[in-house]
Image: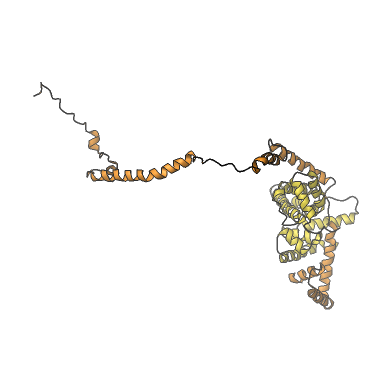
C-alpha cells in the first residue's frame, strides 16, 4: 500500500473525508480485498494505541501548580514596591472634579526654557561667527608668505623650520651716551 | 472520555481576565479545567512520571507568567496544548542530550521508555501498555506529536494542525508515516 492510500484510509476511518470520497472508498473496499485488509490493520493498530489514551497526572496536580503560581503571585506582589490602594486614579480625579468643571483659567505666556533659548541664540549667532572666520582666513591668506603651508597661512602662523627653531633671536644693540 | 472541543468560550476569556487581575480562584479553575488536556499531550509525549508532572506544572506556570500576552486568538485549550507540546519536545531533547553524554545506548533506550506499571491491571494489559509506550517513544520528533494527538487522543486533523501549527496535509502525511513505523513493533499486540 502506498502512503497516499494510507492517508485516504486514515481520513476514511476518522470520518473526515468528503461524502463523495467516502462513497468511492466504500465501493473500492468491496472490490479490493488488499485495501480492506489494510483498513482493518490500521483500525486494529489505532485500537491498540488507544490503550494509553487520556492519561492523568498524579492526584493533587492542581494544588501543585497552585503552590507554584501563588508563590509567583506573592513574589510579584513583593517586588511591586510601595503602591497606593486600588482606585488611586479615581480618587485623584474625584478631588480634581470641581477644578476640571470650572472655567478655564487664562494662562500666562511662559518664557522658553534655557535649552530652547540657547538653541535660538546659536541659530542666530552661528552664521555671523562663520562669516567672521572666513573673513579672517581670507585676510591671512592675502598676507601669506611662500614658506608657509596652507594651514599656517589660514591660521596666520609663522612658518616653523629647523633653522628658526634653533636660532637665538638677536637683541637690539643698546644705545646710549657712551656708545660709539 | 474524549478531549473537550476546541472552541473558545466566553467563560474562558472571563476566567483569563479575572486571573490577570490577580484572582487566584479563576486561575485554579483554568488549571482544573485543562489539566486533562495538558496531561494528554505531556504524558502522551513523555510517558507518565515525575518529569511529565513537572513539565505539566511548567505549562501552567508559563501560561500564568504570560497571561498578559494571551490575546485569545487561539482557544485556551489549543494555546495550552501548544505550550505543552513545545515543552514536551524540549524535554525530549534534554533527555537525548543527557543520554548522549552519560548513558550507554542500551541503557538509554530504557531511560527513554517509561516503565511505570499499573498494579491494578493484569500482566497482559500492562505488557501491551508498555509496548505501546515504548513504540511511541521511539517515533521521531515529527511523527510522535501527530500520532499522540490525532491517533491516541482523538483530536481531529484540523485540531492537530492548529496545535502543531502545521498544514492539515502535513498532519496526514506524518500520521501515515508514523503509523507505518508502528506497524511492526505493535503487530503482536494489534
Q: Quadrant of the C terminus of chain B?
A: bottom right
Which one is in front, A117 or A164? Answer: A117
Seen in the picture, residue A167 relative to B114 is either above or below; the reply is above
What x and y, as percent, mark residue A109? 51, 41
Q: Residue at x 76, y 61 (%)?
A: B159
Task: Tell me if residue A47 comes above or below residue A145 in the rendering.
Answer: below
Q: Is A21 left or right of A171, judged from the image as shown? A: right
Q: Is residue B19 left or right of residue A120?
A: right
Color scheme of the displayed model = by chain
- Which residue appears at 25% of the width and 35% of the height? A165
Q: Can residue A142 be seen here?
A: yes
Farthest residue to the left: give it.
A180
Across the whole image, how many numbered discs are drawn on residues? 0
Residue in the foreground of this view, choosing between B145 and A132:
A132
Residue B151, percent from left and from top: 80, 62
Image coordinates for residue A108, horizontal then vertical, percent: 53, 40
Give how far across and how far down residue A55 sits, in percent: 83, 53
In this view, the residue farthest toward the top is: A178
Q: Which residue is outermost to the bottom? A: A31
- Quarter location, residue B4: bottom right
Q: Residue A147 occupies which quadrant of the picture? A: top left
Q: Is residue B47 visible?
A: no
Is B39 on the left-hand or right-hand side of A102?
right
Q: Is residue B5 above or below residue A163?
A: below
- Quarter placement of the N terminus of chain B: bottom right
**Which chain corresponds to the colour yellow?**
B
**Residue A52 picture quarter:** bottom right
**Residue pictured at 82% horizontal, 43% vertical:** A63
What color is chain A drawn in? orange
Q: Which sits in the foreground, A85 or B177?
A: A85
Amino acid at each position: 500500500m502506498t502512503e497516499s492510500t494510507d492517508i485516504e484510509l486514515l481520513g476514511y476511518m476518522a470520518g473526515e473525508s468528503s461524502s463523495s470520497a467516502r462513497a468511492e472508498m466504500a465501493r473500492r473496499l468491496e472490490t479490493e480485498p488488499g485495501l480492506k485488509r489494510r483498513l482493518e490493520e490500521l483500525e486494529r493498530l489505532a485500537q491498540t494505541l488507544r490503550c494509553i489514551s487520556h492519561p492523568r497526572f498524579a492526584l493533587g496536580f492542581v494544588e501543585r501548580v497552585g503552590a507554584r503560581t501563588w508563590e509567583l503571585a506573592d513574589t510579584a506582589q513583593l517586588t511591586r514596591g510601595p503602591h497606593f490602594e486600588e482606585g488611586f486614579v479615581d480618587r485623584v480625579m474625584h478631588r480634581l472634579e470641581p477644578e476640571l468643571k470650572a472655567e478655564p483659567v487664562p494662562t500666562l505666556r511662559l518664557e522658553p526654557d534655557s535649552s530652547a533659548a540657547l538653541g535660538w541664540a546659536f541659530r542666530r549667532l552661528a552664521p555671523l561667527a562663520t562669516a567672521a572666520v572666513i573673513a579672517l582666513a581670507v585676510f591671512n591668506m592675502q598676507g601669506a608668505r611662500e614658506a608657509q603651508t596652507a594651514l599656517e597661512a589660514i591660521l596666520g602662523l609663522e612658518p616653523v623650520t629647523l633653522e628658526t627653531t634653533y636660532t637665538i633671536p638677536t637683541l637690539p644693540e643698546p644705545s646710549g651716551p657712551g656708545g660709539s | 472520555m474524549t478531549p473537550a472541543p476546541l472552541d473558545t468560550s466566553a467563560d474562558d476569556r472571563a476566567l483569563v481576565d479575572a486571573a490577570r487581575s490577580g484572582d487566584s480562584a479563576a486561575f485554579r479553575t483554568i488549571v482544573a479545567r485543562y489539566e486533562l488536556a495538558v496531561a494528554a499531550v505531556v504524558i502522551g509525549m513523555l510517558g507518565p512520571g515525575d518529569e511529565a508532572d513537572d513539565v505539566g506544572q511548567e505549562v501552567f506556570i508559563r501560561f500564568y507568567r504570560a497571561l498578559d500576552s494571551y490575546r485569545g486568538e487561539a482557544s485556551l485549550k489549543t494555546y495550552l496544548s501548544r505550550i505543552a507540546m513545545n515543552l514536551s519536545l524540549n524535554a525530549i531533547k534534554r533527555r537525548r542530550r543527557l543520554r548522549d553524554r552519560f548513558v550507554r545506548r542500551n541503557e538509554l533506550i530504557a531511560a527513554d521508555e517509561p516503565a511505570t506499571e499499573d498494579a491494578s491491571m493484569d500482566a497482559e494489559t500492562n505488557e501491551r501498555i508498555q509496548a505501546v509506550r515504548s513504540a511511541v517513544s521511539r517515533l521521531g520528533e515529527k511523527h510522535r506529536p501527530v500520532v499522540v494527538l490525532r491517533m491516541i487522543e482523538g483530536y481531529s486533523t484540523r485540531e492537530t494542525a492548529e496545535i502543531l501549527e502545521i498544514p492539515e496535509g502535513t498532519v496526514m502525511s506524518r500520521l501515515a508515516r508514523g503509523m507505518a513505523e508502528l506497524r511492526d513493533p505493535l503487530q503482536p499486540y494489534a
